[in-house]
Image (tube, rainbow, N blue to C red):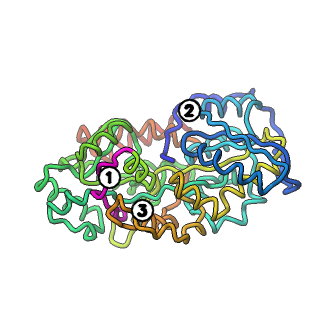
Amino acid sequence: MKKAHVIAALSLLATASCATGGVPAKEVPKISAGKVQGEIQVWSWDVAAKALERLAPAYEKAHPGTKVKVVDIGYDNAYDKITVGLKSGSGLPDVITLEDTAIPGYAENFPTGLVDLTGVAGKYEKDFDPAKWAAAKTAKGLYALPWDSAPVGLFYRRDYFEKAGVDPESIKTWDDAVKAGEKIKQATGKRLFVSDLTTAAGFTTLLQQLGQGYFKGGKVAVNSPEAVRALTLLKTLKEKDLLQNEKGWDGRVTATKQGKAATQPTAAWWTGTLTGEMPELSGKFGVIPLPAFDEGGARTSANGGSALAITAQTKNQDTAWSFVEWLLANKEQQVSMMRTEALFPAYLPSLSDPFFDEPQAYFGGQKINRLFADQVSQIPPVELTGDDTQAGELLKKAISAAVLNGKDPKAALDEAAQQIEAATR
């Protein structure tokens, strides 16, 4: 699933972290791996809810005496509902879906709200995308099991590259991409790629490619050399008129439909958007690994991903864990969700399935799933915290100042770092 900013829950989380009321301190019960029986309820939304609804009957058949009720709570209000439930200590189901960016905040602000899965899930650590495992874990425990991964690649228009005489395989670094972009713009009039500069998403993806998040070692790091380098790249692209600035998801989709840009650096889930919303463009797209900042450097990043967490309010932890394990630490189920709902697995053993080697007609017969599968284990893990959402909000001004208004990237990020330090203490 695509990355969200979890804005809806930000104010409630901030209140919860400072409040003296709310859920009384209590010891979170540990999963005993006992008898699996009875009913559990799972909250999710969109395509993830559809996957859960489709597979729940298969779980029930394999575990007689169990019942899995899936509730699609809708994305727009999901985090409001989850936050209110954690703060009040009631009203939550047995299992909830959480995006990577939401896990640290909930684990930190509600330390007794989610079940620590370390004892039952720790054995699977080497079987999951390292970046996603790091996102689900804090210093105190493992508070979710990774579900879908979101490796980033560079989607490109084959026809634009051909017209400009650019070999996509020749693009190894961002310097190569900039040079290719200039050549493509001269030949076709199209910019290199689309980005929404009113958000921090593009900057964040580049920063993770360099192996860093907003914080490092518990300290604000948005003005580190890596961060300056990421923002400088965006500024360079804009100065060379290679960046198509489009606001919001709809703007991005529309710009792609209209062919305004030659490439799109984004995650594997973009394939579902292309095939579902732009069938008329079949055969025009290809995918290559993300250009590296330095020759031999990381050629992927992450943009999205989700996990399943078990709430401490559950009265049936053993069945809740049994379902989560059956669904996510299982090659058959993960491949099924990839094939049917296009949820790219974070469970590494599933990536060896022959399905990932099938040519995709929409992409000119290219085996794009194998390309992304090979990148999953290479996604640089980064430090995530409960302050990331607030930091992302404060970074918007710095990004706009540097990219749109010409401010020095280091100066803009220094100013943002001071604001983040003051806001997060």
Residue 293 seen anywhere in this rendered image of the structure? no
- Crowd band around label 2 with a 10 angstrom C-alpha radius: few (<14), some (14–19), many (20+): many
The answer to which of 363 and 245 lies nearer the viewer is 363
Q: Which residue is mark 2?
A: 10
Q: Which residue is mark 1?
A: 264
Alpha carbons under labels 1 and 2: distance apart: 29 Å
Quarter of the image for the C terminus: give it. top right
Look at the image and say whether residue 16 sits in the magenta stretch: no
Q: Which residue is mark 3?
A: 300
Q: Is residue 335 left or right of residue 225?
A: right
Looking at the rendered image, the disc whose residue lies closer to the viewer, 3 or 2, is: 3
Look at the image and say whether residue 284 sits in the magenta stretch: yes
Q: Is residue 67 left or right of residue 211?
A: right
Residue at (73, 46) in percent of width and height: 310
Residue 84 seen anywhere in this rendered image of the structure? yes
The answer to which of 155 and 90 lies nearer the viewer is 155
Q: Amino acid at mark 1?
A: Gln
- Crowd band around label 3 with a 10 angstrom C-alpha radius: few (<14), some (14–19), many (20+): many
Looking at the rendered image, the disc whose residue lies closer to the viewer, 1 or 2, is: 1
Residue 140 pos. (x, y %) = 71, 52
The boundaries of the magenta stretch are 277-292
